[in-house]
Amino acid sequence: MTTQAPIDPRRTQPRQRVPHVEVYWKAVTYKTVIAYILLAAAILCGGVLLAKPDLYSAAVAKLNSKLSNVTPEPVDADQNHAKFVNLDGKVQVKKVNSVQWVEADYRTSLDRGDLVQTGSDGAARITFADGTTYTVKPGTLVTVEENSTDNSKPTSVAVRINVGQVDLVTPTWSQPDSKAAVSVEDATAHVRSNSRAAVKADPERKSSEIVVSSGSARIQRGEEKIDLVLGEKVTIPKGGAIQKSNVLAPPELVEPLNLAPIIAENPRTSPVRFEWKPVPDAVSYTLRVSTTAMFTKIVKEEKVIGTSKEISGLDAGDYFWNVTAVDAKKQISDVGAPFKFSLVAQGKSQEMMLEITGTQLHGRVAEIVGRTEPGAALIMNGQPVPNIAPDGTFRHFTEALDPGQHTIVVIGQNRRGGTTQKHVSIVVPK
């Protein structure tokens, strides 16, 4: 019989060794990493400062100049280039130093010698730095001939029409000797300040036309010079004598006012009234409404006997409208400057407060005083009202008004989207 000695609990048995791997790490926060980076950068900058103190001084001086704008940087030359401000449909550009046509966009700048071409559904509006605007109609090819727009000197801009039509609008230039021109095959139209003209070149018919719808222009072919004013036109046949004639002037638009909103509970069923002034010798008019400034997307076109028309079926949104006149010989007037209006939906629960508390005449300028909701926006006769107090009170002075009776239209919109309008009758004595 075998007897086993008892196990002494004070003596532990040796454990069997099991192979294993131990991993140690130390947590480092983002703040610590950033602190190390900044420390390294400080050491590097300190070394540069000690080695080349002049370099440090020059960098600091340049930074201070940038921040304080003490020494203005030269104006970017690109600001003096012609730019596209409206593009509809297919519009392409071929730069003077390129052999390829590219699609035009709002970042495209135009230099002397560049070509611009519009497709049958395309149109483009080009603005030069002096404020002169050229609207290139569909199916047109033009060349930028001149772009001298130094603010300290008289400006000179020009384009040549190879085929198609261009409408030209000039501003009131700060330099009286400034020039804006459109050239056709063998003639040039020099359009004067604050004027509007339409120039068309038709190589197939070997003829060109120039019509002045506002202001004046001078047509020059060789040594021959002809002056044109509002409602006059010249036809320039190739190799033939220049023919001058009278044309219908474009109708002057009255209502809706330019940039004015029209408020309606249901825009699509509410009629919009259009009105314009009569044109002598006109027997009818054509009213067009478009969703684009170039009228490449016509939503309504109506032949009207008279000087007003109500149109319904327009959805809420922004629209442009113009009118042309037609005489008994079927001659059509040029198109004047279009007006823009906004059709706004008005909910009954979104009405806003707008009160006109007083009016006063200061010569030919009307002062309109009223009160609206705090934070609301107001438009008076198409112009924004800038001075609205925090409590909603406002005081606005109109532009100089002609003698006679005027209706001042005040449009308001609050932060909730609510809108309303008021009409104020003003009589300016003669």
Image (cartoon, rainbow, N blue to C red):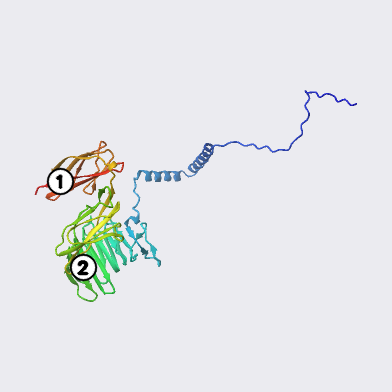
Q: Give how far across and how far down residue 2 sits, in percent.
A: 89, 26
Relative to 14, 95 lies left or right = left
Residue 81 appears in view? no
Residue closest to the eye, 25 or 91: 91
Residue most extreme to the right: 1
Distance Cα–Cα, label 1 vs label 2: 45 Å
Residue 234 appears in view? yes
Q: Give how far across and how far down residue 106 sits, in percent.
A: 35, 57
Q: Which mark is residue 62?
A: none
Q: Is residue 43 above or below residue 284?
A: above
Residue closest to the eye, 248 or 317: 317
Q: Nearer the viewer, mark 1 or mark 2?
A: 1
Residues at discs 1 and 2 in contact (Cβ within 8 Å): no
Element on which disc 2 rests = strand
Q: Is residue 300 above or below residue 385?
A: below
Quadrant holding the N terminus:
top right
Element on which disc 1 rests = strand
Residue closest to the eye, 337 or 351: 351
Mark 2 = which residue?
219
Q: Give how far across and how far down residue 237 sits, in percent.
A: 23, 74
Residue most extreme to the front: 269
The quadrant where residue 112 appears: bottom left
How packed mark 1 is, by other alpha carbons closer than 10 Å (few <14, some 14-19, many 20 or more), is few
Residue most extreme to the bottom: 239
The quadrant where residue 223 appears: bottom left
Residue shown at 80% from the left, 23% from the top = 8
Residue kind at label 1, given as amino acid type = Ser
Q: Which mark is residue 425?
A: 1
